[in-house]
Amino acid sequence: MPGSMSTSINAEGLDVDEHGHVLVKLSDEPSEQWMQAFREYWGKAETPGSRAAKKEAFSHFSEQTIVFRGIDVDGFVEHSKAFTKDAIKYANERTLRFETERDARIRDRAEHAGRDQTHIEAEKAKAHKVKFD
């Protein structure tokens, strides 16, 4: 399910669509958080030298695929495969860190709410004992 990351997303292979776009097949549909982290990392692609990733080749996400345009399979393997693997790893790590921090905040709020509720219940019990006669 998109939006929930119980496991890391992995690249499972390459394909080419009817338009000649290179597709990286993913093990799961990525969440918005994951896609944002991937884009962030991809935007950092350095361009000096011929081995650099071709930043302009990355196009978009489509369900369980990353779409690359203007590059053939050989070009992808030579110029973008390693960087794509690094971007996937970064997106997994970033998403896991985000989810871990979010879960910790939720647990902390629940613990505070429990303590607050206990305090409120104790105050209610004391208040009910007070009589105005």
Image (cartoon, rainbow, N blue to C red):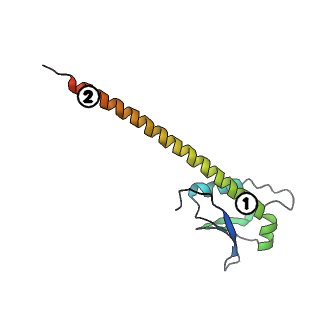
Q: Nearer the viewer, residue 122 or 106?
A: 122
Above or below, comparing residue 113 to residue 78 in the picture: above
Q: Is residue 38 visible?
A: yes
Q: Which mark is residue 103?
A: none
Q: Nearer the viewer, residue 44 or 133?
A: 133
Percent coordinates x, y for residue 122 in the rendering: 31, 28
Percent coordinates x, y for residue 71 in the rendering: 76, 71
Badge 1 amino acid:
Lys
Badge 2 amino acid:
Ala
- SS at mark 1? helix
Residue at the (43%, 35%) spot, across then down: 112
- The answer to whether mark 1 and mark 2 are in CB contact below 8 A is no
In which quarter of the view is residue 118 placed? top left
Percent coordinates x, y for residue 117 in the rendering: 35, 34
Residue tagged 2: 125
Residue tagged 1: 85
Q: Is residue 81 left or right of residue 36?
A: right
Q: Give the residue furthest to the bottom.
A: 18
Residue at the (26%, 28%) spot, across then down: 125
Residue at the (80%, 64%) spot, across then down: 79
Above or below, comparing residue 133 to residue 123 in the picture: above
The answer for how far apart the CA atoms under marks 1 and 2 are is 60 Å
Mark 1 or 2 closer to N-term?
1
Q: Is residue 22 visible?
A: no
Above or below, comparing residue 26 to residue 36 in the picture: below
Residue density around tag 1, few if under 14, some if 14–19, many if 20 or more, within 10 Å: few
- SS at mark 2? helix
Q: Give the residue furthest to the top.
A: 133
